[in-house]
Image (tube, rainbow, N blue to C red):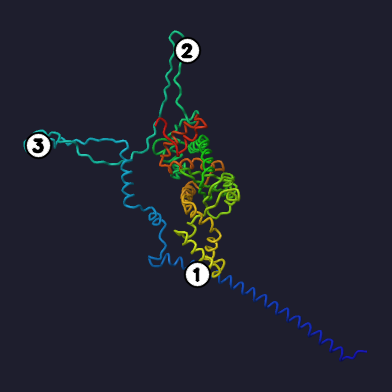
Amino acid sequence: MVSSSDDSSVDWRAEAHRWRAETLRLQELVTKLTMQHAEQIELLQQRVSQLERDNEQLRRQLLGPTSEKMPPIGSEVRRKQRRSKKDGKAERRARAAARRTLQTERIFHPVPDDQRSCPQCNGDLVALGKPEESVEYEFVPARFVRRVHQREKLCCPCCNDHIVLAPAPPKVIDKSQYGPGFIGQLVTAKCADALPLYRQAKQLARDGVPIARSTMTDLFHRAAEILMPIYARMLVLIRQGRRVLADETSFRVQDKGQCRRGFIWTFITGGLVAYLYSPDRSGETPNKLLGGSPGILLCDGYTGYNKVCDVDGRDRAGCLAHMRRQRTKPILEGFKQWLLEQKPLHPPKSPIATAIGYALNQWDPLTAFLDDPGLPPDNNESERRLRLIALGRKNYLFAGHDLGAHNLAVLMSLVVSCETNDINPQRYLADVLLRVQDHPDKRIDELLPTNWSPLGA
């Protein structure tokens, strides 16, 4: 038989065990809360640090000394576009020579009748040497001509059934009332100057040529279809290019009453600039054009170009515009050592750590230009070519459909390639829109902007 004292002893031990377990549980809970609190504090500290950095940058930009303020974008562009005095003189001479080729209109201003006699002897004045000349450049609004083509008809007076009709002049589009020069101007205004078709329609109406926007849209897309053989040849030559520059940007496309995001890609080699449209940003677009081709691809760190630069593809070169540019290999090597030393000293998500990580992860592509003298150290040319896309994105907002965006890419490829080769896009388009339709395929290279000469030149 167990005594009551033994029963009380058992109850006390059970109670002590229960309290001990509860104490351990509370200690674990306190430890867990402390860790969570520490993590939250660390996240808040990182957030505060980020906000302090952003605030400091804005403060310096708005309120700091002039030497510390960030310069306006316009002044930076102008600074980069400055030329030496020698280059400036050459440019002025080139502009003057171009102006001398303009159509010249000579206007003779006679001396008024009441001043044509001598006030001394009242005799008639005679001409003294050549007239004094001064030059004035005046703007004459664009002139549209209504051409009526009259085709001569001949018949034999003896044989009334023999009739000859003069051949019809060539047309870009059958049964169309608009000539190649008009279509070339329409395409150039949109692709080179980012001028939407509705604004062109307003200008044409002011000049006495009302034309429906739907007609202008049809002409624009029909031009892209006609010029497709030249565009296709450009893509072939870009694939064959030893060094290709590439970049991409978003572009809105209308779809069932709403806008979705597509992408315009640019690929550059030599004097050719080609744009491609795709409904997404996947790597299939650059891979379809360049996959399996030899050479070098200069691009940013976007993973969409990885398929092009795989084991059997192109070597990848990076853009130093995404990192502070250095001049020599020894400096770059020293800079890399400094990056390695600095990497563990900064929080992983801080801006400086992000920049250091990018530089180290992309080091081989970023320094590829050291081994290839013909490779530019940056991809700025591709990015410049996409600025026109960005300007158009603001002006005409979106493409009506995927095919419309594709046709825009086709025509912009030809227009921008013309400008790259110092060719007037309107003259080029007015010429090739007619010639390409019966030009031999094996001689299509003659119509490329890099090789083009006007018919009869």
Of mark 2 and mark 3, the one earlier in the sequence is 3
Would you name the residue on which mark 3 appears?
Answer: 118
Residue 265 in the image: state x and y as whole percent: 53, 47
Q: Nearer the viewer, residue 117 or 61?
A: 61
User: Picture coordinates of residue 335 (x, y %)?
Assistant: 49, 64
- What residue do we see at 68% from left, 78% from top? 30
Q: In terms of sequence position, does the residue under pointer 3 or pointer 1 come before the other?
A: 1
Residue where numbered disc 1 is placed:
52
Pick the residue in front: 454 or 20: 454
Picture residue at 57% right of the left edge, 67% below the top? 348
Residue at label 2?
Answer: 162
Q: Is residue 46 left or right of residue 138?
A: right
Q: Earlier in the sequence, mark 1 or mark 2?
A: 1
Amino acid marked by disc 3: Cys
Q: Residue at the spot x=47%, y=59% of the render?
A: 329
Left or right? Give the position of 170 relative to 349: left
Examine the rendering and report whether any part of residue 257 can be seen: no
Task: State the SS at label 3.
Answer: loop
| Amino acid type shown at disc 1 | Glu
Q: Label 1 vs label 2: CA separation?
A: 92 Å
Which residue is painted at 52% across and 70% down in the image?
49
Q: Secondary structure at mark 1?
A: helix
Seen from the viewer's position, the closer of residues 67 and 154 is: 67
